[in-house]
Image: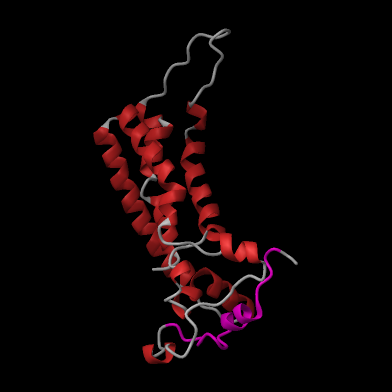
């Protein structure tokens, strides 16, 4: 069985068939009571239970260590004021990014069956089944790749400023200035990485 084979009820829901309504914004709340609160998305049990669902507390478990390290290293190298400033910058960047995601991706016009399926998987599931407690935040299949890309981008931007030398054959490396610190940059994305969990479901 392929790992990412979708169930029939998921494929039907993506096209607006039962158990979905196909009308995210206009459906009467009373009608939702006759529909299930959740559906199975993947046929593979391991993918469905481990990577396609997420308890709302789990993002803190996944990304908490990265947040703590970013704050610690940002304060240690750049100082509390700089770390706080980068935190605010990260918050503003995320707010703007979330707007762009909702405006141009999550609520995109879907006309063909392929477009409707893509729209359903990215954001439509949340509107069709808003009471599914294990899909209130983006599951690992969605959030981890996005978080990895966002975490890697600032690291790659300062990679050329970080030198690694052997103390036996070379003089000690000169420490990069605070603005080039990986930790300081890490604190900038402190607000971005965990909140990407919520982007697809707000």
- The residue at the point 31 percent across, 52 percent down is 92
Looking at this rendering, what residue extends furthest in the right direction? Answer: 1
Q: Position of residue 63 (x, y in %)?
A: 44, 48
Q: Foreground residue, 84 or 68?
A: 68
- The quadrant the C terminus occupies is bottom left
Quarter occupied by residue 186: top left
Q: Where is residue 15 in the image (x, y as percent from the top left)?
A: 59, 83
The span picked out in magenta is 3-24
Q: Foreground residue, 153 or 9?
A: 9
Q: In this view, does 36 lie above or below 192?
A: below
- The residue at the point 35 percent across, 28 percent down is 178
Q: In this view, does 141 lie to the left or right of 54?
A: right
Q: Foreground residue, 61 or 142?
A: 61
- The residue at the point 40 percent across, 34 percent down is 183
Q: In this view, does 75 lie to the left or right of 1?
A: left
Q: Where is residue 75 in the image (x, y as percent from the top left)?
A: 31, 32
Q: Position of residue 181 (x, y in %)?
A: 40, 30
Quarter occupied by residue 24: bottom left
Q: Is residue 92 above or below residue 24?
A: above
- The residue at the point 37 percent across, 54 percent down is 94
- The quadrant the N terminus occupies is bottom right
Residue 126 painted magenta? no
Q: Is residue 189 above or below residue 2?
A: above
């Amino acid at each position: 069985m392929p790992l990412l084979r979708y169930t029939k009820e998921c494929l039907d829901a993506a096209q607006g068939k039962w158990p979905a309504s196909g009308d995210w914004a206009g459906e009467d709340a009373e009608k939702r009571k006759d529909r299930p609160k959740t559906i199975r998305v993947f046929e593979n049990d391991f993918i469905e239970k481990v990577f396609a669902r997420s308890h709302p507390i789990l993002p803190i478990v996944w990304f908490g260590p990265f947040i703590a390290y970013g704050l610690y290293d940002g304060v240690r190298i750049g100082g509390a004021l700089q770390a706080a400033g980068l935190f605010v910058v990260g918050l503003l960047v995320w707010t703007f990014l979330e707007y762009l995601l909702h405006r141009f991706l999550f609520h995109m016009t879907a006309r063909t069956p392929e477009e409707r399926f893509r729209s359903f998987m990215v954001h439509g599931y949340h509107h069709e089944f808003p009471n599914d407690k294990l899909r209130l935040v983006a599951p690992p299949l969605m959030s981890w790749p996005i978080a990895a890309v966002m975490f890697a981008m600032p690291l790659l931007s300062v990679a050329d400023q970080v030198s690694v030398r052997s103390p036996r054959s070379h003089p000690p490396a000169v420490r990069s200035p605070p603005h080039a610190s990986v930790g300081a940059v890490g604190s900038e994305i402190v607000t971005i990485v965990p909140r990407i969990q919520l982007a697809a479901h707000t």
